Image (spheres, grey):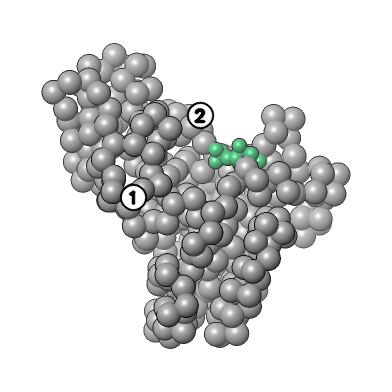
């Protein structure tokens, strides 16, 4: 079974406060993009779960979410068959694009079919939540969604927009946990309650209006990301200067994306960044 495992961007990421369980309450707009890994699920004669992947930073053992997902399903449903999960990585790792989370969701959806588990969307979403905050979005077959709670409470958005972006992933390590830990204490997080960035964005998104969408892009993790990596401000500014409608970090970074007016416009912006940055992609809504 060969599957496509997409990435996401956050067009808006509002942090509403810190919760008692240590996670942060979010309000975010996810966009699924056409930057995808390819995953092959190959049934095995034994009962092992094996990961095959050439990428040096993808864990091959039980640290990989796809292994946790497969082993949990084996246990819960008494499945005696093992599976080799071959991952062909195109999505940068630990980059704010939810590549690993998307892989976990794709394997969950794939094994539900391969092993004839008959899990409903709601049951799949419950499994997804238990492995991480960003996995559930990919369970819903939707291009755009509102994410609330830890990011796992998903409401698909009936929006037809097709956006074009230039995505730049600098080669620096960024840990989600570390970025969240740099946010100011809960009491100081009220800022975004006053400014509802989701509701500022949505009317423009419904009209597929790049200039309005560009102005509405927002990420409350930006200050925390820049405090860890001040040099990323230069990249943001360069993308703005290159004529983008808007520029924003995705998730906890370090990926930065520019919103372009069209595919051609995205190509023009990309051409100015190709030489200086290793990982530059033109991506669009999937
Ligand atoms: O859920 P996930 O494993 O992706 O989260 C990684 C880390 O990011 C968490 O351990 C937590 O420190 C932080 N996080 C958070 N609030 C969220 C999502 C993630 O504080 N809503």
SS state under label 1: loop
Identify the residue at horizontal 47%, vertical 41% (top origin). Answer: 135
SS state under label 2: helix
Identify the residue at horizontal 65%, vertical 61% (top origin). Answer: 229
What x and y, as percent, mark residue 214?
60, 73
Q: Is residue 96 above or below residue 124?
A: below
The answer to which of marks 2 and 1 sits earlier in the sequence is: 1
Residue 226 appears in the picture as rendered: yes
Spatial CA distance of label 2 from label 1 is 26 Å
Quick check: 268 left or right of 212? left
Q: In the displayed image of the protein, which residue is found farthest to the right?
A: 187
Which quadrant of the picture is home to ligand 1? Answer: top right
Question: Quick one: label 2, few (<14), some, or many (20+) residues within 10 Å?
Answer: few
Quadrant of the rendered structure where residue 36 is? bottom left
Q: How many marks?
A: 2
What x and y, as percent, mark residue 30?
52, 54
Q: In the displayed image of the protein, which residue is found farthest to the left?
A: 45
Q: Is residue 104 above or below residue 11?
A: above
Quick check: 265 left or right of 224? left
Q: Nearer the viewer, residue 248 or 25?
A: 248
Q: Which residue is mark 2?
A: 130
What x and y, as percent, mark residue 24?
69, 41
Identify the residue at horizontal 39%, vertical 29% (top origin). Answer: 62
Q: Is residue 104 above or below residue 33?
A: above
Quadrant of the rendered structure where residue 76 is? top left
Identify the residue at horizontal 22%, vertical 38% (top origin). Answer: 41
Quadrant of the rendered structure where residue 211 is? bottom right
Question: Quick one: label 1, few (<14), some, or many (20+) residues within 10 Å?
Answer: some
Q: Which residue is mark 1?
A: 55
Q: In the displayed image of the protein, which residue is found farthest to the top?
A: 78
């Amino acid at each position: 079974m060969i599957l496509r495992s997409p990435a996401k961007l956050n067009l808006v990421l509002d942090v509403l406060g810190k919760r008692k369980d240590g996670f942060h309450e979010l309000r975010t707009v996810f966009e699924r993009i056409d930057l995808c890994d390819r995953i092959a699920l190959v049934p095995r004669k034994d009962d092992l779960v094996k990961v095959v992947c050439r990428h040096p930073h993808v864990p091959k053992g039980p640290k990989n979410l796809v292994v946790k997902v497969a082993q949990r399903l084996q246990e819960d449903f008494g499945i005696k068959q093992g599976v080799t999960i071959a991952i062909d990585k195109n999505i940068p790792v630990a980059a704010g694009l939810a590549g690993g989370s998307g892989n976990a969701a794709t394997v969950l959806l794939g094994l539900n079919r391969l092993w004839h588990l008959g899990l409903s969307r709601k049951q799949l979403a419950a499994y997804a939540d238990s492995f991480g905050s960003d996995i559930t979005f990919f369970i819903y077959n939707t291009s755009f969604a509102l994410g609330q709670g830890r990011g796992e409470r998903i409401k698909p958005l009936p929006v037809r927009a097709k956006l074009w972006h230039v995505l730049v992933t600098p080669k620096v390590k960024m840990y989600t946990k570390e970025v969240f830990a740099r946010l100011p204490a809960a009491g100081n997080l009220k800022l975004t309650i006053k400014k509802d960035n989701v509701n500022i964005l949505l009317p423009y998104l419904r009209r597929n209006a790049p200039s309005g969408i560009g102005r509405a892009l927002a990420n409350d993790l930006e200050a925390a990301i820049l405090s860890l990596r001040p040099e990323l401000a230069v990249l943001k500014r360069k993308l703005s200067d290159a004529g983008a409608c808007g520029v924003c970090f995705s998730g906890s970074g370090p990926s930065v994306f520019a919103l372009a007016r069209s595919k051609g416009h995205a190509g023009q912006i990309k051409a100015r960044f190709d030489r200086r940055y290793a990982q530059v992609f033109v991506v669009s809504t999937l």
